Image: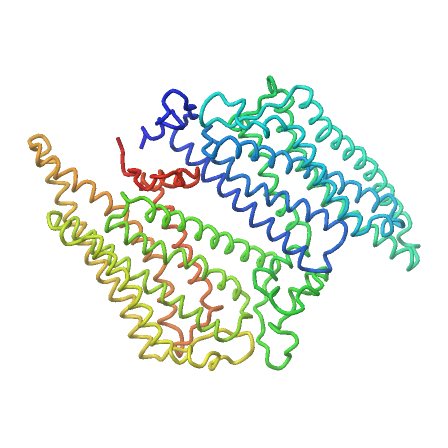
Amino acid sequence: MELWEETELCFPQLLNSSCRRTLRPRSLSMLIYVTLSFVSLLTVVLNLLVIVSISHFKKLHTPTNLLLLSLAVSDFLVGLLMVFQIMLIDGCWFFGDLMCSLYFLLDYVITCSSIGTMVLISVDRYVAICDPLKYPAKVTEDRVKVCVCLCWALSVAFQCLLLRDNLQQPGRYSSCSGECVVVVGYVDGIVDVLVSFVGPVTVVIVLYLRVFAVAVAQARTVRSHVTAAANRDSLKFTARKSEIKAFKTVSIVILVFLICVCPYFCVTLSGGDSVLSASSVAFVMCLFYLNSCLNPLIYALFYPWFRKSIKLIVSLQILESGSCEANVLLNMELWEETELCFPQLLNSSCRRTLRPRSLSMLIYVTLSFISLLTVVLNLLVIVSISHFKKLQTPTNILLLSLAASDFLVGFIMFFQILIINGCWYLGDLACSLYFLLDYIITSSSVGTVVLISIDRYVAICHPLHYPTKVTNGRAKFFGSLCWIGSALCHGLMLKDNVQSPGRFSSCRGECVVIIDYVAGLVNFFLTFIGPVIVIVVLYIRVFAVAASQARAMRSRVAAVTAQEAVKVTVNKSEMKAARTLGVVVVVFLICLCPYYCVTLSAEDAVVSASSAAFVICLYYLNSCMNPLIYAFFYPWFRKCIKMIVTLQILRPGSCETNVLETH
């Protein structure tokens, strides 16, 4: 694996024309890739929430919010574009010269349009604070839409003119294969900096100095006349106070934007010969990308309507008819105090679980993050084992089955987030199917861990028979049998709930299933007690054999023959795999035991989704941890992540790559 990091050429088959990659320690490379991938994913998701919020709710269609929508679109594109920047971290470009030029064009267009949007936001706040009586007439939705479209169109036209030579002859300035650079003339570069940075920043600063002076004057006026103000004047002062609050929030957005984007233009301005290499500006580009991730967090911190919109989106209430008419600008505290799941059904609606607003937001954000991370990480495991033929061993096929269940857990967790407050909005049939799928995934995961334990038992205790007893075909067969058996078992156990959905619900918005006491005990022994006993017994036996082999190796290490040395190496490799999978099994049991303890102790075997939220989330957390364990213990998984993130798996023949090589 160390030599893998030391490979210097981007295209090893092109010895004389290939560029050299930037060499870094393996740990640093992994840290960079994982961090930037996380930031990219978070940027896309958070800005998508902003886009959906403002686009869906009509009450949010104000001039200021339309400008924030334009900014969110550019930030969303930044998150997508960051995938290519991640690929360029080591200085190698694999998509050809035309794609390189288009990448830089899109990057410049997004940057320029973002700055233009910031200027428009500054103008909007200037008119709102300094000339509030004329604001409704001067700043309308139609005018804002025209200005936004004009900003994007001018950005595209200007940057196409700036990069015309690079677009007409892509790769004309590349010195080797795998290099991605564009060359901008010195005069063009100066004009670009002046038009798309110095000029706009000057306008923004001047406008905000003027707005700040007016805001301070208004604050003094309010304080001096507050006791003698009439009702009409009070309303005027209240309106101004609201505008000033919006001004403060948008000011933070602009300040953070300038802090993050200034280094990029400073590097551009000081670059020798105006040659901009994607790898050389990695840091300043990542700083710009980080700003795109911070903007939605600022909205969530200062805008109650955005927090309310997130809650409506996550709970899928935006799918209800007429949801676009919801007034998300209403007082957030009153929203939190609404007790009924369906306020329009006063006599039949369930009551929601009331929590402080800050705690509710923390729960939703945390669980959404875990859900997203679970899906992405396990998708990496699935792609790795499915794509690379060298990884398709019996043990890894079982890990693939476990990753598939963990991947589904990430999706299931979305529904668990929805019922955190005790309300279910998707109907009784969806509730029954949710519990059925949850039980199938849990049961199949336990079964897969049993198969992994058997695999390690045979590999350590009967190494000579392992290649004949444990084959890919048998691993696939038993993995499939595990899933089919789980589906049949739980389909039979929940047949009453599936046939008559909602028969046990006491009110609208409740999601419960009732399991017969005897059936619950049988299920408990079949899907937990029995498998856990098997796992513990097998791993005790594996541990005993591994300890005896370790003692034998230490006592005979000096006299071992060449043939025996090979055998010892194989056993050592298998024991290392056993230790890694042992960690997976232990973490799995720790996270799963509380779930079954709650199930066993539940009165009348009634399992409520809201009451079991904590133990289910603990189980979901295990699904997120498994890929992290693989990344920590398995060099081949780290190598696969690098190839996936850098899109090297798209090369023809990449599936034949031996990712198990350690050299």
The vertical placement of 46 against 176, above or below, is below
x 31%, y 33%: residue: 1
Give the residue at x 50% y 52%.
Answer: 369
Q: Is residue 316 left or right of residue 629?
A: right
Residue 21 horizontal/vertical position (percent): 42, 26
Q: Where 497 sits versus 270, above or below? A: below
Viewer-side residue, 594 vs 199? 199
- Where residue 452 appears, x then y in whole percent? 25, 54
Q: Could you tell me which quadrant the C terminus lies in?
A: top left
Q: Is residue 359 or residue 465 the one in the foreground?
A: 465
What sort of colour scheme is used for the picture? rainbow
Vertical order, 118 against 341 (above or below): above
Q: Position of residue 45 (x, y in %)?
A: 56, 50
- State the image coordinates of residue 506 (x, y, percent, origin top left): 52, 81
Q: Is residue 543 left or right of residue 214?
A: left
Q: Residue reaching furthest front? A: 168
Q: Among all residues in the image, which is located at the extreme top? A: 272
* Residue at the image position 59 percent from the left and 51 percent from the top: 48
Q: What residue is shown at x 39% (from left), y 28% (from top)? A: 11
Question: How many marks overall?
Answer: 0
Image height of 60 relative to 554, above or below: below
In-image side of 375 versus 275 (left or right): left
